[in-house]
Amino acid sequence: MLIVAGIGCRRGATGDVVVEAIDMALRTSGLTRTQLALLAVPDEKMHEAGIHAAARDVGVAVAPVTQQAMERVSAGALTISARVQDLKGVPSVAETAALAAAGNGARLLAPRSANTMATCAIATGDGR
């Protein structure tokens, strides 16, 4: 099974802040960094330097996820933020990014973890 960390963040979030969110989500899910295969982010966030710094620190690649893909899996989200729904069209950016990238049979291992600048959710799926 593929293990994916979905990331949501504010503009300008540093790599350290993103890694903090990843580590919180991994701990909550009972996993370690070595089990993580990929960071999934909305394609609009692919330019964020903090996400790429976090991926280097954790040792995984970054994969863009389209808005459409996130919307398709939004029913599987565990967290529902009215603000995020209004702004982004999905109940949770981190959760839907993780679900979309994890592939068929994707499921969240826990609700998203958050700090002041970033959110992270861990999903598992077959990667297809």
Image (tube, grey):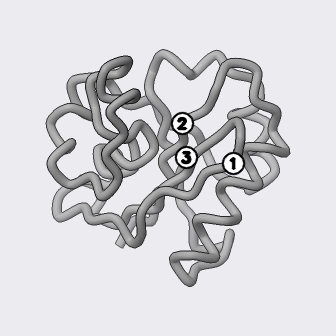
Q: Residues within 10 Å of mark 3 (few under 14, many from 20)?
A: many
What residue do we see at 17% from left, 58% from top?
Answer: 104
Quadrant of res 97: top left
Q: Position of residue 98 (x, y in %)?
A: 39, 49
Amino acid type, label 2: Gly
Local secondary structure at mark 1: loop
Instruction: Compute the Cα span from label 3 to label 2.
Output: 10 Å
**Relative to the observer, which residue lies in front, 3 or 20?**
20
Choose mark 1 or mark 2, whichever is in front. 1
Q: Is residue 14 left or right of residue 51?
A: right
Question: Which residue is the site of mark 2?
Answer: 8
Choose mark 1 or mark 3, whichever is in front. 1
Amino acid type, label 1: Asn
Q: Earlier in the sequence, mark 1 or mark 2?
A: 2
Local secondary structure at mark 3: strand
Asked if 31 appears above or below 73 in the picture, the reply is below
Quadrant of res 10: top right
Q: Position of residue 96 (x, y in %)?
A: 33, 43
Residue 115: mark in rendering: 1
What residue do we see at 82% from left, 33% from top?
Answer: 14
Q: Position of residue 2 (x, y in %)?
A: 39, 65
Q: Position of residue 113 (x, y in %)?
A: 56, 58
**Relative to the observer, which residue lies in front, 10 or 22?**
10
Question: Which residue is the site of mark 3?
Answer: 39
Looking at the image, do the residues carrying marks 1 and 3 touch, with CB atoms under 8 Å apart?
Answer: no
Local secondary structure at mark 2: strand
Q: Quadrant of the N terminus?
A: bottom left
Instruction: Compute the Cα span from label 1 to label 2.
Output: 11 Å
Instruction: Compute the Cα span from label 1 to label 3.
Output: 17 Å
Q: Earlier in the sequence, mark 1 or mark 3?
A: 3
What residue do we see at 55% from left, 51% from top?
Answer: 120
